[in-house]
Amino acid sequence: MAPSLLEIAEAPGAFVTPRHPHVVEGGGWVFLPLGPQIGAVQRVRLDDGEAEAARAEVRTLAAERGLPEVGWWLSDLTRPAGLGARL
C-alpha cells in the first residue's frame, strides 16, 4: 500500500527512491544523516518496551558516523504515544 501524504511529510527520508546508501531502516524507525554534525530518526513505530533498545541502536549508528547529535522526528503517527518524554 502506498504511503499517505502525512506519512511522507512526517518522514521524507524514509520514502526517497532510490534510498540513499546512508539511510538505515531499523526495527520501527529510519535513521539518516542530515549533515556532518547531526542525524535524524524518522517514521518511529515502536512497540511498548522497545524505546530503550532503539535509542541505544541509534546512538551506536550516530557514533559510528561521527554524528554528535541526533534528532527524533515525532508526530501524531509515532508509536507509542508519549515517546518524546522517554527519549
Image (cartoon, rainbow, N blue to C red):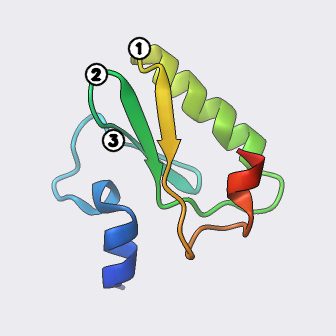
On the image, numbered disc 2 is attached to which residue? 36
Badge 2: residue crowd in 10 Å (few <14, some 14–19, many ≥20): few
Q: In the rendered image, which quarter is residue 74 located in?
A: bottom right
* Residue 37, position as x, y percentages in the image: 35, 22
Kind of residue at disc 2: Pro
Q: Are marks 1 and 2 in contact (CB under 8 Å)?
A: yes
Residue at x-position 68% and y-position 54%:
84
Kind of residue at disc 1: Gly
Q: Nearer the viewer, residue 21 or 77?
A: 77
On the image, numbered disc 3 is attached to which residue? 23
Q: In the rendered image, which quarter is residue 17 located in?
A: bottom left
Point out the tag, 3 or 2, that comes first from the N-terminus: 3
Q: In the rendered image, which quarter is residue 11 located in?
A: bottom left
Q: CA distance from mark 3 to mark 2?
A: 14 Å
Q: Residue furthest right?
A: 49
Dot in front, 1 or 3: 1
Q: Secondary structure at mark 1?
A: loop
Position of 45 relative to 18 (above/below): below
Dot in front, 3 or 2: 2
Residue at x-position 73% and y-position 39%:
53
On the image, numbered disc 1 is attached to which residue? 66
Q: CA distance from mark 1 to mark 2?
A: 8 Å
Point out the tag, 1 or 3, that comes first from the N-terminus: 3
Residue 20 appears in view: yes
* Residue 55, position as x, y percentages in the image: 66, 38
